[in-house]
Image: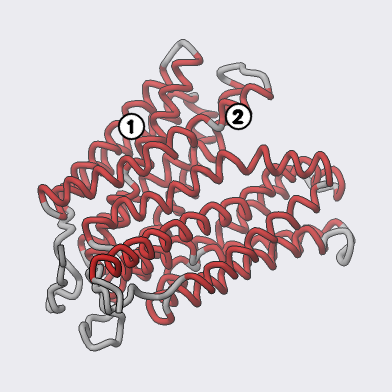
Amino acid sequence: MKPPKIEANLATASRWTTIGLLAGLALVSYVERSNIAVAANYIKPEFGLTDIQMGRVFSSFLIGYSLFQIPAGRMGDRFGPRLVLALAALSWGLMTLLTGLLPGIFVSGTLGILWTFLVLRFLLGVGEAATFPVAARAIANWMRPTERGRANAYVIAGVSLGSTITPPLTALVMVRLGWRASFYVASSLAFAFALIWWVVARDRAPTASGPVAREPAPGAGESTVSWWRLFGNRNIVLLSLSYFVGGYILYIFVFWLYTYLVDVRHFSVLRSGVFSSMPWIVAAVLTPVGGILSDHLVSRWGESTGRRVVAMTGLALSGLFLLYGAMAANPYLAIAGLSLAVGFEEFTEGSFWAATINVAGPHAGAATGILNMMGNLGGVASTALVPILVHRFGWVVALGSGSVLAVLGALLWLGIDARARLDAGAVAEAMPE
């Protein structure tokens, strides 16, 4: 029998190993979803596809990803994160492998190839929908409430790292081995992480060490509250509406930053590519900082105030820097402002996800599925609205729309009580020192 101190240390290492694996899965998921944006420059001329058709291919992923957030979260709640994330990662690998294998080899004709891309990208979105809601379920199972902000932030920081490394690595593989090889390499990463996750991960922390406050699983007897009540819960609704704002801001940069730097700031194609990575580098730093600060303030001021201060501050600063970046005359100051806008938007992530987990109780997967669905719908809105605003009013107004929404999103947090659990009658969680 291990001494209590050694066992506690092993439990702590196991918990943070789980978070590291979740961050790795998040990074790999972003590689699978974004490599086609780089490969499109080779795919379009080879198969005679237009920009509009490739836009539909990109959108098909987002449709599948958004629609299946809630079902994926429910699966994580019901069947556990170990099984669901392992199967999800296997599906990423399979869809990515087929994306490189089927078009032009097993499927011919422009229309057939287009539909092949559309279906495979939609199915990739369906599989990737599990990534963050089910990771949130794992965090709810493994981490103390005062650690969930940083744990979620570390996982989401994997996306920023993926955003930074995917374009150059994908381009390198394509230049040397062709665009198909970039999908084969990406698929191998997904298969590898599926295997590692299945072997190493567990659904819950070991009960013997008692290292964390454990969320009850639905149907385990601790709560009879239906997950359908999430849709009418004021805190979930306000959190999701505020997160919609974050998605609106974030997707401006995902889809339009490169165009903005070339067309408005007049950087070269190469320099625009380099500067397009700056917001994600800043986000990779500020995301965990926000999560750590959120947990620290929760320890001092309580769940509701601690999460609220970080979220409101981050959204307000994001809106301020977004407007500054849009109006700055110096292009390098503009890049700095826009990078900080993304960084402070991502600074709020730990607070959003931790607050949602706490409110949802045993339905953390379903609740964070709702949250992430709304964030992606915010991206759909900005993707459609920004070019219209640019055409009619110019880029300052288009980017300024994100600033206005950031302020509104911050104000919504005044009505959020992150202490109010959906299953208010559940047994109080034990918090060992």
**Disc 2: CA contacts within 10 A as few (<14), some (14-19) or many (>=20):** some
**367 or 349, which lies in front?**
349
Identify residue for label 1.
319
Badge 1 amino acid: Gly
Inspect the image, locate mark 2, and give the three-letter code of the amino acid beneath it: Thr
Q: Is residue 370 among the parts visible in the rendering?
A: no
**Percent x, y of residue 92:** 63, 64
Label 1: element kind: helix
Residue 356 percent location from the top left of the image: 28, 60
Q: Which residue is drawn at 44% across and 29% down?
A: 339
Residue lying at the far top of the rendered structure: 330
Residue at 49%, 66% in the rendered image? 130
Q: In this view, does 106 lie above or below 23?
A: below
Camera-side residue: 185 or 196?
A: 196
Give me the residue at 68% from left, 54% from top: 57
Q: What element carries label 2?
A: helix
What residue sits right under mark 2 in the picture? Answer: 259
Quadrant showing the C terminus: bottom left
Residue 5: x and y in percent read: 24, 65
* 287 left or right, relative to 223: right
Q: Position of residue 36 (x, y in %)?
A: 69, 49
User: Mark 2 near mark 1, Cβ–Cβ under 8 Å?
Assistant: no
